[in-house]
Image (cartoon, grey):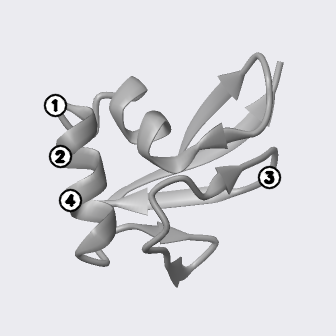
């Protein structure tokens, strides 16, 4: 599992996917979220701007990310 440290919380789910290079653009991030391909804490998340905070685990294409605050 990859640990990601953010300097300020919350961060929006679509921005997290883009900043961590799991997708190539914000539009692609919105698309994969809308299609139900992203899990947050083990549940499918379809809200593009879902607020992600410390302790959340985001999964996409076999990549797991745990969020930590700097």
Residue at image mark 3 = 55
Q: Is residue 40 above or below residue 50?
A: below
Residue 6 x %, y %: 70, 23
The residue that mark 1 highlights is 24
Which of the two discs, 2 and 3, labels the residue nearer the N terminus? 2
* C-alpha distance separating marks 4 and 2: 5 Å
Mark 1 and mark 4 in contact? Answer it, CB < 8 Å.
Answer: no
The answer to whether marks 2 and 1 mark residues whose Cβ atoms lie closer than 8 Å is yes
Q: Are marks 4 and 2 in contact (CB under 8 Å)?
A: yes
Q: Dot 4: what SS? A: helix
Task: Give the quarter of the figure containing the C terminus.
Answer: top right
Query: Which element is circle 3 on?
Result: loop
- In the rendering, which numbered label is found on residue 31? 4
Q: Secondary structure at mark 1?
A: loop
Question: In the rendering, at what x and y percent does residue 33 appear?
Answer: 33, 64
Alpha carbon separation for disc pair 3 and 1: 25 Å
Q: Which mark is residue 28?
A: 2
Q: Residues within 10 Å of mark 2 (few under 14, many from 20)?
A: some
In which image quadrant can residue 41 be found? bottom right
Name the residue at 48% across, 37% down: 16
Residue beneath the point at 16% across and 31% down = 24
Give whichever of discs 3 and 1 has the lower sequence position: 1
């Amino acid at each position: 599992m990859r640990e990601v440290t953010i300097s300020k919380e919350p961060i929006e789910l679509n921005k997290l996917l883009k900043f961590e290079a799991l997708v190539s653009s914000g539009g692609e991030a919105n698309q994969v979220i809308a299609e139900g391909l992203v899990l947050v804490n083990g549940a499918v998340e379809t809200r593009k701007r879902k607020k992600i905070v410390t302790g959340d685990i985001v999964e996409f294409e076999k990549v797991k990310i745990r969020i930590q605050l700097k």
